[in-house]
Image: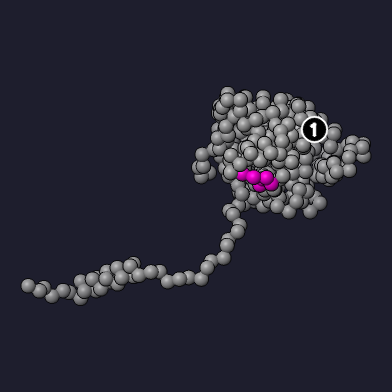
């Protein structure tokens, strides 16, 4: 027996049939979309106790690490990189870190600006994207005065952080801000001195550069520790809040895929390679034993994680991604 359907039922059945037919038909071909190319702004947030840490990307730079790493051979470096599906030149991150203690806003390393090539110099833009302004930064702590760590102190020839006090170990300041040292340096090293002087001298002239000597408490919960070797005054910084701890390594190491497996491998940028290797091994051992967070200037962005000892080396454990809260 046929039952007459209502107009509403017929409309529903017609719509369902149309939807089914459309679902079963191949989608129409669209014009190819252009490549987007740009990634999201380079910042990442994590809480360490009551302190907020924001990792800031200054960009990446391709480094011929097989030619730069020492106490090894180019062939061995290439072989080690290949095990991690990497090759030389290696795309190498340059990271800075913004620490909000709730009372002070502290930037650890300032990026390169224009001192290390066109692929860097993005730290200030990413700081703004992360919700802060350079004028809000109270203090800038420099791990050492190589150009990819100090260049961003300047913007258009003026202090990029006009209200900030800049701090670094006096041994680095005495070395890199010395005209006499620059005069006797090899020609290919003079630009390092020029970059440091250009970036720091405006703060020196304004009375806003305050060096320290070795292990120093800089703020409540924020300390500097001497880790000399990469440069004469290379420092690492530690923050601690509510029993949580994080270390900021600067250039204690450069190539994760190689130097975690073999901490004795050094790099041509080291002023004292033997001392740098000792400091690296010491830092690895402590971080693995205590399990605290580590941030590295040249670890793949955001460069935050922990270490686990394995054999004669270490394994890098990046932080598990979580949205900032």
Q: Relative to 176, say whether 10 is above or below.
A: below
Mark 1 lies on residue: 271
Relative side of 127 to 319, left or right: right
Queried whether the magenta region covers residue 256, the answer comes back as no
* Closer-to-camera residue (229/140): 229
Residue 79 in percent (x, y) is at: 63, 39
Q: Residues within 10 Å of mark 1 (few under 14, many from 20)?
A: some
Residue 235 in percent (x, y) is at: 73, 31
Rendered residue at 71%/50% (across/down): 120
Rendered residue at 72%/44% (across/down): 64
Q: Relative to 272, say whether 64 is above or below.
A: below
The prevailing secondary structure element of the residues shown in magenta is loop
Is there any visible trace of residue 260 in the rendered image?
A: yes
Question: Which contiguous range is marked in magenta?
Answer: 86-91
Residue 35 in percent (x, y) is at: 57, 62
Rendered residue at 71%/39% (across/down): 74
Q: Determine the residue located farthest toward the front in the rendered image.
A: 75
**Snapshot quadrant of residue 284:** top right
Is there any visible trace of residue 211 in the rendered image?
A: no
Helix, strand or loop for disc 1:
loop
Rendered residue at 51%/71% (across/down): 31
């Amino acid at each position: 027996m046929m039952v007459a359907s209502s107009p509403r039922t017929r409309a529903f059945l017609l719509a369902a049939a149309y939807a089914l037919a459309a679902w079963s038909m191949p989608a129409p071909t669209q014009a190819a979309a252009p490549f987007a190319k740009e990634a999201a702004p380079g910042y990442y947030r994590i809480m360490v106790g009551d302190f907020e840490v924001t990792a800031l990307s200054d960009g990446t730079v391709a480094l011929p690490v097989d030619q730069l790493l020492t106490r090894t051979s180019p062939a061995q470096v290439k072989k080690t990189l290949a095990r991690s599906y990497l090759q030389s030149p290696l795309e190498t991150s340059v990271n800075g870190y913004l620490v909000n203690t709730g009372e002070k806003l502290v930037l650890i390393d300032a990026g390169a600006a224009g001192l290390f090539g066109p692929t860097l110099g993005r730290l200030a833009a990413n700081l703004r994207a992360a919700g802060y302004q350079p004028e809000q930064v109270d203090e800038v702590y420099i791990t050492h005065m190589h150009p990819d760590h100090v260049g961003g102190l300047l913007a258009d020839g003026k202090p990029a952080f006009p209200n900030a006090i800049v701090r670094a170990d006096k041994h680095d300041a005495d070395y890199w801000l010395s005209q006499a040292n620059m005069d006797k340096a090899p020609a290919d090293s003079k630009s390092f001195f020029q970059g440091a002087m250009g970036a720091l001298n405006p703060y020196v002239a304004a009375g806003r550069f305050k060096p320290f000597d070795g292990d120093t408490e800089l703020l409540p919960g924020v300390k500097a520790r001497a880790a000399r070797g990469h440069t004469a005054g290379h420092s690492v910084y530690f923050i601690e809040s509510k029993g949580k701890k994080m270390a900021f390594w600067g250039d204690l190491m450069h190539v994760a895929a190689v130097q975690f497996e073999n901490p004795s491998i050094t790099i041509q940028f080291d002023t004292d390679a033997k001392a740098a290797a000792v400091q690296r091994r010491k830092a690895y051992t402590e971080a693995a034993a205590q399990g605290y967070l580590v941030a590295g200037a040249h670890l793949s962005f955001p460069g935050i994680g922990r270490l686990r000892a394995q054999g004669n080396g270490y394994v890098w454990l990046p932080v598990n991604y979580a949205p900032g809260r």
